[in-house]
Amino acid sequence: MSDIAERVKKIVIEHLGVESEKVTENANFIDDLGADSLDTVELVMAFEEEFNVEIPDDAAETIVTVGDAIKFLEKNAA
Amino acid sequence: MRRVVITGLGLVTPLGCGVEPTWRRLVAGESGASRVEKFEVSDLACKIACQIPRGDGTEGTFNPDQWMEPKEQRKVDEFIIFAMAAATQALTDAGWHPKTHEDQTATGVLIGSGIGGIEGIYEASTILNEKGPRRISPFFIPGRLINLASGYVSIEHGLKGPNHSVVTACSTGAHAIGDAARLVALGDADVMVAGGTESPINRLALAGFASCRALSTRFNDEPTRASRPYDRDRDGFVMGEGAGVVVLEEYEHAKARGAKIYAEVVGYGLSGDAFHITSPSEDGDGAYRCMQAALKRAGISPSDIDYINAHGTSTPLGDEIELRAVERLVGNAAATLAMSSTKSSVGHLLGAAGAVEAIFSVLAMRDGIVPPTLNLDHPSVETPIDLSPREAKRRDIDVVLSNSFGFGGTNASLVFRRAA
């Protein structure tokens, strides 16, 4: 697993208070990990902070699974 | 109007988490004051506070994980966590866990706070300045709003009745209980979870209250001696943190389910000073009218009061003004009246004070014990009223009155009577 994937999963576990086994690449933040709309906003902010990258709102809307986040950050993070 | 009784109690105070741990230490004459260690105080005029003993939850310590999931705790200021702890205790004590739609919609919440999430507002404003608006959490607003204490409690326990809140500075807790009792009396709810909560111990609030010249500053090296209501050496209040929540219930509703009844809420009075933003009116007129209104509502005379839990914050001005107002109210009955300020032990819990002290009043009645006014070594004025200095004393108590007065000149008095 890439370093980025590890860091993404760590943030998701911390912010959503879920067990690590549940945080698979296919896991949907809302449907599978119990996040609400505010949690997802905060997650995106945490990714921005961790990876020092700006995630515009229209891009944020496409990040609905753990894998989406990893893919976006692998492409855009410095 | 319908009769309203108290059937559940919950406390988180500087003396402990839970009603019995707090009450035991209060009656034993212990103080909850200590030097503040969790942030820098060297540049603050007041370096002490009455802080909740935090720990693993045993021996009366407060462990937030027992009351709210860690993931939720992160989103809110502590006043919401304290409210959750006190409300859950009170509902458990009352044995009231509504599951049907009918019971849930008949049960409401009215928990207030004086200043709410001031610490979170301070932290977020720092983030805004240093990192910009895109770093402000989506939980910043909902985690600071005062009525979110009521909101969180209702969500946790499925309480779908009236959901309300009070913000009246240091009268908040008393107003919350009084207003909630009216909602029950008028039939808007059969059960109300009511009280106050506060988490003010941070640099900003200590600086702000010190700037108002409200805090004690002369006892930084002897914290347990700082809160000394009515004593000639008093120089301000000691800030406290915590929450008090009661379950209020319509009398027949409580009786029908065989609930334990602590007391009946018989009187509630409100008044405004219309005088000054922080100082009480010098003639004590607001306090007097407030107590008088509560007695009128209760249909009792001043001589029926056995014990008054005073507002008595330990400020130079306020204590004597309240004392004179009480003397004027009770007249010749002053000689047989007991009065104490439990702020001498737990400090001033601001928006939680009125609710915590209402609970102390009820416990005083339950156990026939007047809790002491600590550090009252040299009363600043003479009075025929027994101010219960230093030690708790036994006394049969059937009727209690609890006073709360707040910035803005807002006053509330509650009267409780032993349940017949």
Image: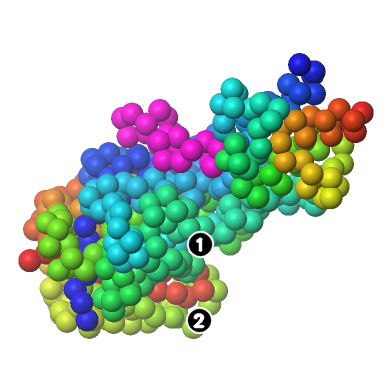
Which chain's residue wears label 1? B
Against B34, residue A41 (above or below) is below
Give the number of marks. 2
Colour convention of the picture: rainbow
- Which quadrant would residue B266 be assigned to in this image? bottom left
Q: Which residue is mark 1?
A: B147
- Which quadrant would residue B400 be assigned to in this image? bottom left
Asked whether the residues under marks 2 and 1 belong to the same chain, the reply is: yes
Q: Main secondary structure of the magenta part?
A: loop
Against B300, residue B136 (above or below) is above
Image position of A78 (left or right of B50): right
- Which quadrant would residue B64 be assigned to in this image? top left
Residue at the location (30% across, 64% down)? B102
Q: Which residue is mark 2?
A: B275
Amino acid type, label 2: Phe
Between discs 2 and 1, the one toward the N terminus: 1
Q: Is residue A12 magenta?
A: no
How many C-alpha atoms fall within 10 Å of the one at disc 2: few (<14), some, or many (≥20)?
few
Amino acid type, label 1: Asn
Give the x, y percent position of residue A77.
88, 31
Element type where label 1 sits in the image:
loop
